Image (cartoon, grey):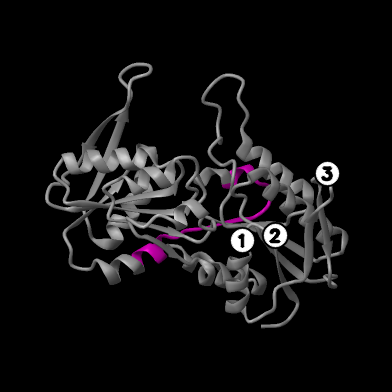
Amino acid sequence: MSFDIKVFSGNANKALTEEVCGYLGIPMGEAKVGRFSDGEVNVQILENVRGYDVFVIQPTCTPVDENLMELLVMIDALKRASADRITAVIPYYGYARQDRKVQPRVPITARLVADLLSAAGTHRVLTVDLHAGQIQGFFDIPVDNLQALPIFLDYFEKKYKGEEMVVVSPDAGGVERARVFAKQMELPLAIIDKRREEANVSEVMNVIGDVKGKKAIILDDMIDTAGTLVNSVEALIKEGATGAIAAATHGVFSGPAAERISNSRLEEVIVTNTIPLNQAMKEVKSPPITVLSVADMVGEAINRIHKGESVSSLFV
């Protein structure tokens, strides 16, 4: 690979950036990303980027606002340093859950972030498992939305091959993702239908599909507070499932997530390193927390984008 490519990292996930640079066989770009005494982001690019194809890796995870601002300021610095093309590599795209108006007088933050990235000088976006695929339409620049399913497929085929299993979507919105995974694994599909009978009454979960005598793979794009997840586990076991495994691309794990997962009947929780595992989750002893790496997939996508090659073969 020629050296007219540079990869920089914000502070959110330098470990992933180092893995990606290792895959590409290039050193990480040198940049100073700090704070002024009042908390403002202070960025300085410490090497020449004039005419380079530049990639900035920064998930907008917790603290979301700080990491998003770091990314925007880095992009602005690179633009003013005459980088030829700037690709924002956002393994986890924050603010994605507000992608439409579901109530009066609420924002559409997924579109707002897309506008901010474009205004800062981004030429292209590379991300992993957007919360809703249609967010790509909020951009007027190219967006590559990689999928972590191939990484999960490889893991499950190696570890759980031959077991009686069923793939479960924890809600109606994730059915398409679960269906693709189930088809690839040649497993049956089940869906959890969540309904709140009345205000201030806990959700009633109905399992659609046969899970009796099978181990359930609960597949989602993210695990946040884990409330829906642990309730899904109880509903599945009540319906006769022999056990449950959670698999999600983004391990947000906010609020009471660690406590809920520790007290659940989950056998394993599998996430990727799009977001660094927080300290509370590192201390969870049971169930085991498995972190799979997306570095090779992201690195290969960067390689192909740089060379002007297709990235479609990286999808399931």
Q: According to the image, label 1 marks what residue?
A: 13
When the figure is inspected, residue 160 is found, relative to residue 25, above or below; the finding is above
Tell me how far mark 2 sits from mark 3, CA to CA: 19 Å
Kind of residue sitting beneath label 3: Asp
Residue 20, given in percent of the width and then of the height, sits at 59, 72
Residue 136, given in percent of the width and then of the height, sits at 58, 47
Tell me how far mark 3 sits from mark 1, CA to CA: 23 Å
Kind of residue sitting beneath label 1: Asn
Tell me how far mark 1 sits from mark 2, CA to CA: 7 Å
**Mark 3, secondary structure of its residue:** loop
When the figure is inspected, residue 131 is found, relative to residue 125, above or below; the finding is above
Res 249 → quadrant: bottom left
Res 151 → quadrant: bottom left
Between 132 and 295, the one lying in front of the other is 295
Residue 52, given in percent of the width and then of the height, sits at 79, 71
Asked whether the beta carbons under mark 1 and mark 2 sit within 8 Å of each other, the answer is: yes
Which residue is at a point 73% across and 44% down the rendered structure image? 116
Quarter of the image with the N terminus is bottom right
Q: According to the image, label 2 marks what residue?
A: 10
Between 58 and 287, the one lying in front of the other is 287
Q: According to the image, label 3 marks what residue?
A: 38
Q: Give the range drawn in magenta.
A: 136-153
Kind of residue sitting beneath label 2: Gly
